[in-house]
Amino acid sequence: MTVTRDQEQGMVAVVQHAAHENFRLIEDHDLDAVAANVTGDFVNRRSADEPMAARTPGPEGMAATVAWLNRAFADIRFEIH
């Protein structure tokens, strides 16, 4: 399958939006948005030092990660360039 430049740019935009949305929901502690932004096969690959709940696949694991990060860093913010 050949991907055109326009298709590639569209895919990049989708991935960038998802990444920015993940950072936003962490900053805002928006647990309601987790299910809309993370699929059931999501795995937090950086969860080795996080609570066990953060290792759960899918939205539940992401929600646990969001909650843990907000407990650890009350004013968490990400600067995206």
Image (tube, rainbow, N blue to C red):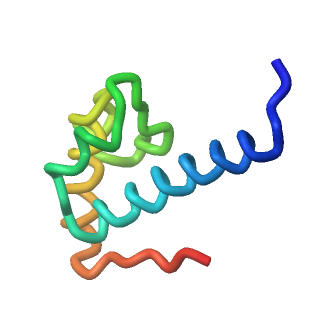
Instruction: Please state which of residues 20 and 59 is positioned toward the viewer in this rendering.
Output: 20
Residue at the farthest left position: 32
Q: Is residue 19 left or right of residue 1?
A: left
Name the residue rendered at 23%, 66% in the picture: 70
User: At 56% across and 47% down in the image, what residue appears?
Assistant: 15
Between 27 and 16, the one nearer to me in the picture: 16
Position of residue 69 measured from the top left corner of the image (x, y, whole percent): 29, 62
| Residue at x-position 33% and y-position 33% | 55
Q: Nearer the viewer, residue 49 or 23?
A: 23
Q: Where residue 4 appears, x then y in whole percent?
A: 82, 37
Res 58 quadrant in image: top left
Position in image of residue 38 (x %, y %) = 34, 38
Task: Locate residue 7 relative to residue 70 in the image: left or right.
Answer: right
> Residue at the spot x=46%, y=62% of the render?
20
Towards the viewer: 14 or 58: 14
Task: Report the quarter where the N terminus lies.
Answer: top right
Q: Is residue 31 placed above or below 45 in the rendered structure?
A: below
Left or right: where 8 falls relative to 36: right
The quarter in which the C terminus is drawn is: bottom right
Q: Is residue 29 above or below residue 18?
A: below
Q: Number of labelled discs?
A: 0
Quarter of image, res 2: top right
Residue 5 percent across, percent down from the top left: 82, 45
Q: Quadrant of residue 66?
A: bottom left
